[in-house]
């Protein structure tokens, strides 16, 4: 048997370090066994998926040196590798399940589903809806069918008993069927859900080992049942521990930069980031901290993964990056790294329109645009002296904007402008006054290039990291304030 693993990202936002981490372990496992590593794009969520996000994922995995053997861009014998292009395949397999009586059409409306869930809640029952809960009298089904009501296809699931799934790292995991609902397989628009598409594709693409984040454990019983319904061999499952913040909470963009774009913009070296990701729950047999991807592949052993919640610590990564720069890069290589990082045509060209109207000599560029070539700017509380806002309002403004920007998926100037306008209105401030502290937080000075353009160029995580840094410099938000702010933020209907 040839080992085949895959990474199956959904292109719904910035390329996440968690995706790279899972990709790395899948790649190492495949290579260690002389197998193949596949990249599949899971873009069945047509509203949230974007081509830009897909491109960023491909670019960043490649930047990290994580190459795939088959994928949407390189092709392969099992394509297409983009789920949005495989619609007919899923419809056909859903029909097969319907024909065999393993799935059923469900004509329930969302109001009815809410009612059913409310009733179960009131009776103190588990909220998972079972086929029996969803059933309608035959004549009602016939009527809705005749009148062409929208329907979904759901899978049948047992009402009781338990399902045991084996996991390479966790052994046998037992899940009570009572917790598992009659999962939707095909949505009313005919698109598959993650579960159907994922199982069908893993099978058709010959995937032998499914290594993914532990947040998918609860889906495993449904998947196991689908493999049984189709009478297909099930790949071996392996649920990897989730990356954590130093305070052990789940790594999230609220607290830490999670986008690979950020680490690139910040000037981390790809080999250091990949090395550091390899340290997440795994270690080399001799415990050394610095190793190459090739060394990791050669020494890889999945059983050395420990489940203790690996901490993604920016300070440690920064240290390791410094070691790489000092030990591995001679002047020529360092110069090359600088070029690849920011001193290249593509990046500088984005900045030129920002500086051109504002300079008289070339040497004016750096004081004006230096922040494009740095991490968080050196700020002090006094940097904000010129801002005539109460301290609390100032903090609130920066905090609300940070939260608001977390939700922006299309990171472009016009979107950022709309977000800022909406908040300025909520604060009852003119745009110029609203943006003044943002300007200082993002560019590090009171005179620089346009702040919204700067944000668009710097990207989401770098912008938010700078805003968070400004909040810290201003004394931070206390727990009490945070609670108050969150409440107010929720009430703001902007
Ligand atoms: N599309 C899923 C994700 O975004 C894939 C999960 C899996 O690997 O099965 O993580």
Image: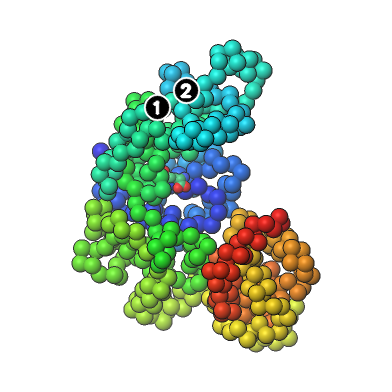
Mark 1 residue element? loop
The residue wearing badge 1 is 159
Residue 145 position within the rendered picture, expressed as x and y whole percent measured from the top left: 61, 17
- Outermost residue on the top side: it is 139
Which of the two residues, 449 or 257, is positioned nearer the viewer here?
A: 257
Ligand 1 positioned in quadrant:
top left
Q: Is residue 70 visible?
A: no
Relative side of 416 to 346, left or right: right
User: Do residues under tags 1 and 2 come within 8 Å of each other at their CB atoms?
Assistant: yes
Residue located 57% across and 64% down the image = 483
Relative side of 324 to 262, left or right: left
Quadrant assignment for the N terminus: top left
The residue wearing badge 2 is 132
Q: Is residue 407 visible?
A: yes
Residue located 50% across and 25% down the image = 133
Q: CA distance from mark 1 to mark 2?
A: 9 Å
Tell me which label, 1 or 2, sits earlier in the chain: 2
């Amino acid at each position: 048997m040839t080992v085949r693993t895959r990474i199956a990202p959904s292109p719904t936002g910035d390329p996440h370090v968690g995706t790279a981490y899972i990709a790395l372990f899948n790649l190492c496992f495949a290579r260690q066994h002389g197998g193949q590593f596949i990249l599949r794009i899971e873009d069945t969520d047509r509203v949230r998926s974007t081509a830009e996000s897909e491109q960023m994922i491909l670019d960043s995995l490649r930047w990290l040196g994580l190459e795939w053997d088959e994928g949407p861009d390189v092709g392969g014998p099992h394509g297409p590798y983009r789920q949005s292009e495989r619609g007919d395949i899923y419809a056909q397999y859903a029909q097969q399940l319907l024909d065999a009586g393993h799935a059923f059409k469900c004509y329930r409306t969302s109001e009815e589903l809410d009612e059913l869930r409310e009733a179960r809640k009131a009776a103190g029952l588990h909220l998972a809806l079972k086929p029996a809960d969803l059933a309608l009298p035959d004549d009602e089904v016939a009527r809705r069918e005749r009148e062409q009501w929208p329907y979904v296809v759901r899978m049948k699931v047992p009402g009781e008993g338990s399902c045991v799934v084996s996991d390479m790292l966790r052994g046998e995991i037992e899940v009570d069927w009572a917790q598992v609902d009659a999962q939707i397989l095909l949505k009313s628009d005919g698109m598959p859900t993650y579960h159907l598409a994922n199982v069908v594709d893993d099978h058709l693409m010959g995937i032998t080992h499914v290594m993914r984040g532990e947040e998918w454990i609860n889906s495993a019983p449904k998947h196991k049942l689908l493999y049984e319904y189709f009478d297909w061999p099930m790949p071996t499952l392996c649920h990897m521990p989730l990356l954590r913040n130093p305070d052990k909470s789940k790594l999230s963009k609220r607290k830490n930069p999670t986008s690979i774009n950020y680490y690139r913009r910040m000037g981390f070296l790809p080999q250091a980031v990949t090395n550091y990701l390899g340290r997440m729950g795994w270690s080399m047999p001799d415990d050394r901290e610095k190793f190459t991807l090739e060394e990791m592949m050669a020494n890889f052993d999945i059983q050395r993964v420990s489940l203790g919640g690996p901490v993604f610590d920016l300070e440690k990564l920064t240290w390791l990056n410094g070691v790489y720069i000092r030990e591995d890069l001679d002047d020529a290589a360092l110069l090359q790294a600088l070029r690849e990082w920011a001193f290249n045509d593509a990046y500088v060209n984005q900045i030129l329109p920002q500086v051109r109207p504002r300079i008289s000599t070339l040497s004016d560029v750096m004081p004006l645009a230096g922040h494009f070539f740095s991490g968080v700017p050196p700020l002090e509380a006094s940097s904000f002296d010129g801002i005539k806002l109460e301290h609390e309002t100032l903090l609130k403004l920066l905090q609300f904007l940070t939260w608001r920007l977390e939700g922006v998926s299309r990171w472009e100037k016009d979107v950022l402008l709309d977000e800022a306008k909406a908040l300025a209105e909520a604060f009852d401030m003119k745009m110029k006054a609203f943006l003044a502290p943002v300007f200082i937080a993002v560019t590090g000075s009171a005179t620089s290039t346009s702040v919204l353009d700067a944000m668009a160029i710097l990207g989401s995580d770098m912008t938010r990291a700078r805003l968070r840094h400004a909040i810290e410099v201003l004394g931070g938000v206390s727990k009490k304030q945070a609670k108050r702010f969150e409440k107010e933020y929720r009430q703001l209907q902007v």
